[in-house]
Image (cartoon, helix red, strand yellow):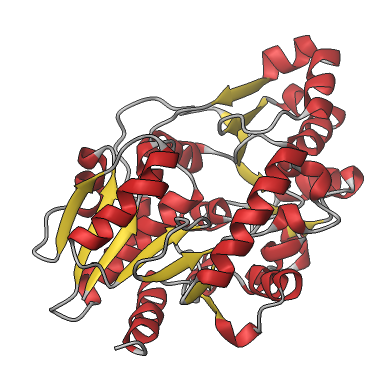
Amino acid sequence: MNILVDAHVFDGKYQGTRSYLKGLYSALISMAPPKWIFFIAANKIDNLKKEFGEHTNIKYIKLNNNKFYRLLLEIPYIIKKNNIDFAHFQYIVPPFKNCKQIVTIHDILFEQSEFKKFFPLKYRIINGILFKMSVRRSDILLTVSNYSREKISELYNVDLSEIHVTPNSVEIDFKKIEITSKTFKGEKFILYVSRIEPRKNHIILLKAFFELELYKKGYLLVFVGSKDFVDKQLLKYINKNKELVKQHVVWKSDLTLNQIKLCYYNCSLFVFPSVAEGFGIPIMEAMVFNKKIIISNQTAMKDFNLPPELTFNPYDVDELKNKLMNMLSNKKDYKELYMNILSEFKWEKSAEKMIHLINQFI
């Protein structure tokens, strides 16, 4: 059994799809039947070797950086040359199908009427066409949450029984960090890890932070993540409060994974105010470090089943302000709760499901 993994996401910045492939295939490589060979493909082979290591059931393949060349010509050629039985893609499949296809659609938030405003029109049109094509042509259709499963079924008219959930998790060794830098060591700060785009709702956390004047109590507000779509409201608010933002807000992008871990390790509180998510990996990462958290109670974030004291309506700044004040003074330990939640999300469980689904075709 030869399985191709399109892992070009490892050529870019750290993000959810990269975490998904790393966790899922690290488990699969150790659990799969002996005759299964994984062809993992990306442009930067060294990145892949660093993440997956050297194993007898892994072969690395170098991909071209050009996505059109990759999808139109290169991947079909690789499939034919290596007698690939299954090829696994994130979101978008090649236009030509010459083996069975596994597709993971992490979310289709841009298709949902209440969230369309957060995505550019061009993005919605192009990805709407491509995602639907991928769903229709997939032999195994995966997603990462029950919420996304229901929305894919509803909006793309796919029977729920044909959509399989392989949820995200956090790697066993995620808590291991190297104290190689003083990343906010000794500082009091509130942390949010996420790309910067409108639906991520950075603005409500900024407003709550400044309206409570938490900076007068010695707190910084730290945003970790790169810019994606332009958030005009956020930019307007920042320009209106330039001096306060300059003095009390820290923006970090292109951090290494170890530096991101240090941010979790050192933060006073983790807040996740996004209005729409297909999953929400940073929430679990904060749990691993046993950090106090406050998260949005919308979309896939409901799947964590957290108590009301740890959640809030991401459209209600007053509720967030109350939760911030309560949590910053809260001495309660949530470790047992977090461990129970994390135990429900294991890469090994997702890998077992993948093996079962593939075996149905053998």
Instruction: Say if residue 187 shows up in the picture.
Output: yes
* Residue 60 drawn above or below residue 86: above
* Residue 70 drawn above or below residue 12: below
Front residue of this view, candidates 218 and 297: 297
User: At 41% from the left edge and 75% from the top edge, which residue is drawn?
Assistant: 350
Q: Quadrant of the C terminus?
A: bottom left
Q: Identify the image quadrant of residue 361.
A: bottom left
Front residue of this view, candidates 203 and 181: 203
Percent of width and height locating residue 251? 59, 24
Instruction: Say if residue 334 shows up in the picture.
Output: no
Number of numbered discs: 0
Farthest residue toward the left?
Answer: 56
Q: Quadrant of the N terminus?
A: bottom left
Percent of width and height locating residue 158? 66, 78
User: At 32% from the left edge and 59% from the top edge, which residue is drawn?
Assistant: 5
Percent of width and height locating residue 54? 12, 54
Q: Identify the image quadrant of residue 76.
A: bottom left
User: At 87% from the left edge and 48% from the top edge, which residue is drawn?
Assistant: 315
Farthest residue toward the top?
Answer: 243
Percent of width and height locating residue 271? 67, 46
Is 286 positioned to the left or the right of 218 in the image?
A: left
Front residue of this view, candidates 37 and 281: 37
